Image (cartoon, rainbow, N blue to C red):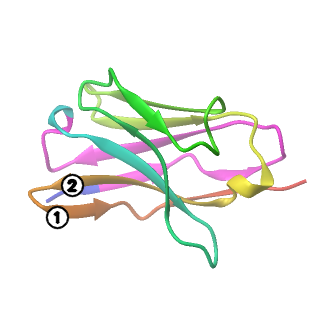
Amino acid sequence: QVQLVESGGGAVQPGGSLRLSCAASGFTFNNYFMKWYRQAPGKERELVADITSSGHMTDYADSVKGRFTISRDNDKNTLYLQMNALKPEDTAVYYCEVWYRGVEYLGQGTQVTVSS
């Protein structure tokens, strides 16, 4: 079955960096478009970044452009999100997502807290 397991979250001061990982299994990872979402308390889920199956094309929310970088290692079946220059408004639970055979799968999420 499809499994997505995020890791790498934590508490960091404004201006700091974190690297999130998403370990994928149960599907042929290098065939699928992948996304990172986030959801802050009381807010709707927000698309943060996405990446094509090859990793050659990426896209970002305006709020994170120039600060976050999405990437993937298809040999390791792992998706990444490098987050730099973090701001308090980046505080949220971060999820990786894949659509597989018409079904949306999300991991359990990893908490990112940006606070001084």
Q: Amino acid at mark 1?
A: Val
Tell me if 111 is positioned left or right of 60 in this view. Answer: right
Q: Residue 18 location in percent, x, y?
A: 65, 39
Distance between the alpha carbons at the discs numbered 1 and 2: 5 Å
Marks 1/2 in contact by CB < 8 Å: the verdict is yes
Residue sitting farthest toward the right? 116
Residue sitting farthest toward the left? 101
Query: Who's the residue at 13% across and 46% down the image?
Result: 27
Residue sitting farthest toward the front? 62
Q: Magenta segment: does it hold 96?
A: no
Mark 2: give few (<14), some (14-19) or many (20+) Cα within 10 Å: some
Mark 1: give few (<14), some (14-19) or many (20+) Cα within 10 Å: few
Q: Nearer the viewer, residue 43 or 7?
A: 43
Which residue is under mark 1?
103
The N terminus, quarter of image:
bottom left
Where are the magenta residues, as a range? 4-29
Q: Nearer the viewer, residue 116 or 53?
A: 53
SS of the residue at dot 2?
Answer: strand
Tell me if 94 is positioned left or right of 23 in this view. Answer: right
Location of residue 85 by image quarter: top right
Tell me if 27 is positioned left or right of 18 in this view. Answer: left
SS of the residue at dot 1?
Answer: strand
Q: Amino acid at mark 2?
A: Trp
Q: Magenta segment: does it hold 24?
A: yes
Q: Residue 99: which numbered mark, if any?
A: 2
Query: Who's the residue at 66% across and 32% down the image?
Result: 67
Q: Residue 26 location in percent, x, y?
A: 15, 50
Residue sitting farthest toward the bottom? 42
Tell me if 103 is positioned left or right of 58 in this view. Answer: left
Location of residue 77 by image quarter: top left
